[in-house]
Image (tube, rainbow, N blue to C red):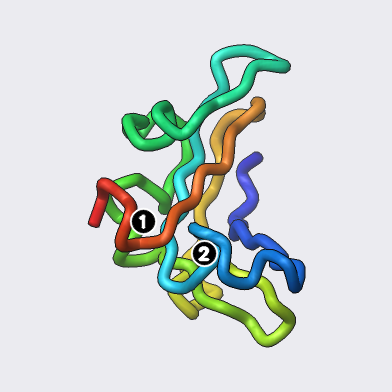
Amino acid sequence: VSVPGLVGLHRGNNDLDSLGLVAPSLVKLILEPSAGSEVDDAQCRSASDSLRVTGLTHSTSKTKHEGKVRGDNSIVFDKGNPANTFTASKAGIVAVCYCAAANCPET
């Protein structure tokens, strides 16, 4: 909380061409309704700016937080610029939703 950061995902060899784990891809962070609950694809698609962060919104995800592949089979959602961070203003449980840019409603 209150510390700038990034989101990245490591891709195992079996996941290199999985939907969403290809570049370009987008990320959304949404608050989970309660501890232990699950967020499904429909909730990820319809989520709006529900997470209390600065520097990352669903509408700016494509311009500043598009996933870019790093040499170690990781995707980091900073559009290739480590300065594209976001800061959480409140602790809590979140769901990390990601999708290939061509399949995201924000594109």
Q: Residue at x 26, y 50 (%)?
A: 106
* Above or below, comparing residue 5 to residue 67 in the picture: above
Q: Residue at x 35, y 62 (%)?
A: 101
Give the image location of residue 33, x and y in percent.
55, 15
From mark 2 to mark 1, how far is it between C-alphas?
Answer: 9 Å
Q: Which residue ends up furthest to the bottom in the rendered image?
A: 71
Q: Amino acid at mark 2?
A: Phe
Label 1 Cα neighbours within 10 Å, binned few <14 / some 14-19 / many ≥20: many
Question: In screen coordinates, is 26 left or right of 16?
Answer: left
**Residue under numbered circle 2:** 77
State the SS at label 1: helix
Instruction: Residue at 50% x, 53% y: name it.
Output: 86
- Looking at the rendered structure, the kind of residue marked 1 is Ser
Estimate how packed mark 2 is, as few (under 14), some (14 to 19) or many (20 or more) residues with alpha carbons within 10 Å.
Answer: many
Question: Quadrant of the image for the N terminus?
Answer: top right
Q: Quadrant of residue 47?
A: top left
The local secondary structure at tag 2 comes to strand
Q: Do the CB atoms of the residues marked 2 and 1 lie less than 8 Å apart?
A: yes
Please tell me whether residue 77 is drawn above or below residue 4 in the rendered image. below
Q: Position of residue 45 (x, y in %)?
A: 36, 36
Residue 107 in percent (x, y) is at 23, 57
Disc on the earlier residue, 2 or 1: 1
Residue visible at 66% across and 27% down in the picture: 93
Along the horizontal axis of the image, is 25 left or right of 63?
A: right
Q: Which mark is residue 45?
A: none
Task: Compare residues 43 and 66 and report the one nearer the observer.
Answer: 43
- Residue ranking furthest to the top: 34
**Residue underneath mark 1:** 61
> Does residue 95 appear to the left or right of 10 in the view shown?
left
Is 59 rendered above or below residue 10? above
